[in-house]
Amino acid sequence: MRVDRDAVALDDPVGASLRGNHAHLARRLGHAATYVPGVATFSAVPADADPAAWADLARLLGRGELADMFSCPATPPPDWEPVFALDGRQLIWSGSSHPDHPAAEAENSVVVLGADDVPEMLDLIKRTEPGPFWPRTHEMGTYLGIRDRDTGTLVAMAGERLRPPGWTEISAVCTAPEARGRGHAARLIRALVARIEARDERPFLHAAEANTGAIALYERLGFRTRTHVTFRGFRTP
């Protein structure tokens, strides 16, 4: 197992991404940052954010808007209404995996998805609900898909989301109900791992604690839990 490198960047994956690889997709004010509309709803303030930082974020987002704080542990002022809190975990690549599913290898090939594929990507997201995905989310990194060999329909996808220095998050892993059990998710994850490591970066991902099936898959593919987190969202005053 490799030694973790620069894992401290994963303590604030949203903020580190917005300050670095995703600076071109960021809106910033003072010590607050968020993504431009249509890309992601994630926002960031320092872990020890003072009232001024929260005020900056409120101005960025607007009145009564969702502040999706992802795994940021900072506590907002009391007039910020809690919207959700979800227990989860952060997993990192340990450098080991198992062979591809032979049926998936024989029947379908992995393709790169782009802007023209967004309607199908959004439809698949709606059907499978793997997590937040918006019309411009694909701009955060490379998204891969698998199409049915006979119909050409997009039946599985996964892609790159947060990109703190030295790391790339794998996200939006989903498979249409009628195409499950064929190893599509595993193939897509392995393909993304190979792309990420080719850039001399390391893969990581997040999962809800309740999603035990996904966690088991990630562990079989070579990921291990780094830390437990709580995903939280608030409504701006």
Image: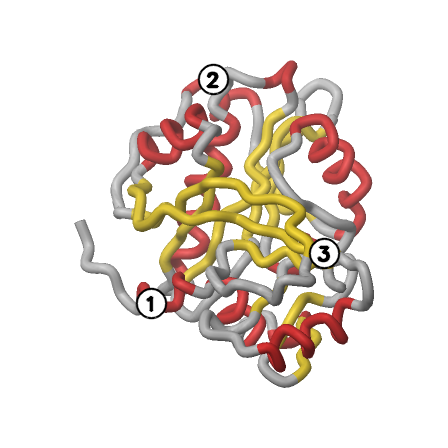
Instruction: Evaluate if marks 2 and 1 touch, with contact meaning CB atoms under 8 Å apart.
Output: no
Residue type beneath disc 1: Val
The residue at 46%/45% (across/down) is 206
| 152 with respect to 207 (left or right) | right
Q: Which residue is mark 2?
A: 103
Query: CA–CA distance between discs 2 and 1?
Result: 39 Å
> Which mark lies nearer to you, 3 or 1?
3
Closer to us: 90 or 137 = 90
Q: Is residue 192 above or below residue 157?
A: below
Q: Determine the secondary structure under disc 3.
A: strand
Q: Which residue is mark 3?
A: 235
Q: Determine the secondary structure under disc 1.
A: helix
**CA neighbours of label 2 inside 10 A, class few (<14), some (14 to 19), many (20+):** few
> Which mark lies nearer to you, 2 or 1?
1
Residue type beneath disc 2: Ala
Closer to us: 189 or 237 = 237
The residue at 74%/49% (across/down) is 134
